[in-house]
Amino acid sequence: LYTFSFYALTLLHALHVLGGFVPLRVVWIGARELRYGASRHAGLTYCAMYWHYLGGVWLAILVSLHVLA
């Protein structure tokens, strides 16, 4: 059960990371085209929030698996 849970959570996390590359690409293209400024930066903020959230979730998964093992 432990091994299955580890790989299932790893797969779900990997899918979210791969899915996060789409908005990251959109933000990257927008930055290259100078669409962002001091008053227009919502896309950058949301993208950064998403990636920080994924990092936090991954840390929580690793810690909980380490504590439960």
Image (tube, rainbow, N blue to C red):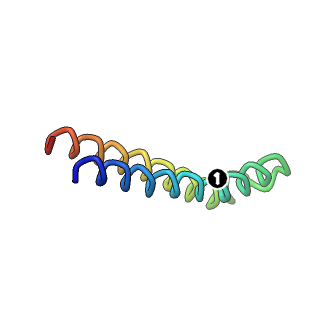
> In the image shown, does 27 or 13 lie closer to the viewer?
13
In which quarter of the view is residue 42 placed? bottom right
Q: Amino acid at mark 1?
A: Phe
x and y, in percent, of residue 18 in the image: 59, 53
* Few, some or many residues within 10 Å of mark 1 (<14, 14–19, 20+): few
- Name which residue lies at 51% across and 57% down: 16
Marks counted in the figure total 1
x and y, in percent, of residue 14 in the image: 50, 51
> In the image shown, does 61 or 10 lie closer to the viewer?
10
SS for tag 1? helix
> In the image shown, does 13 or 49 lie closer to the viewer?
13
Q: Quadrant of the N terminus?
A: bottom left
x and y, in percent, of residue 22 in the image: 67, 58
Horizontal relation, residue 63 to residue 12: left or right: left
- Name which residue lies at 55% across and 59% down: 46
Q: Quadrant of the C terminus?
A: top left
In which quarter of the view is residue 35 placed? bottom right
- Name which residue lies at 31% across and 53% down: 4
**Where is mark 1, residue-wise?**
21
Which residue is the extreme one toward the left? 68
Horizontal relation, residue 2 to residue 8: left or right: left
- Name which residue lies at 49% across and 54% down: 49
> In the image shown, does 15 or 40 lie closer to the viewer?
15
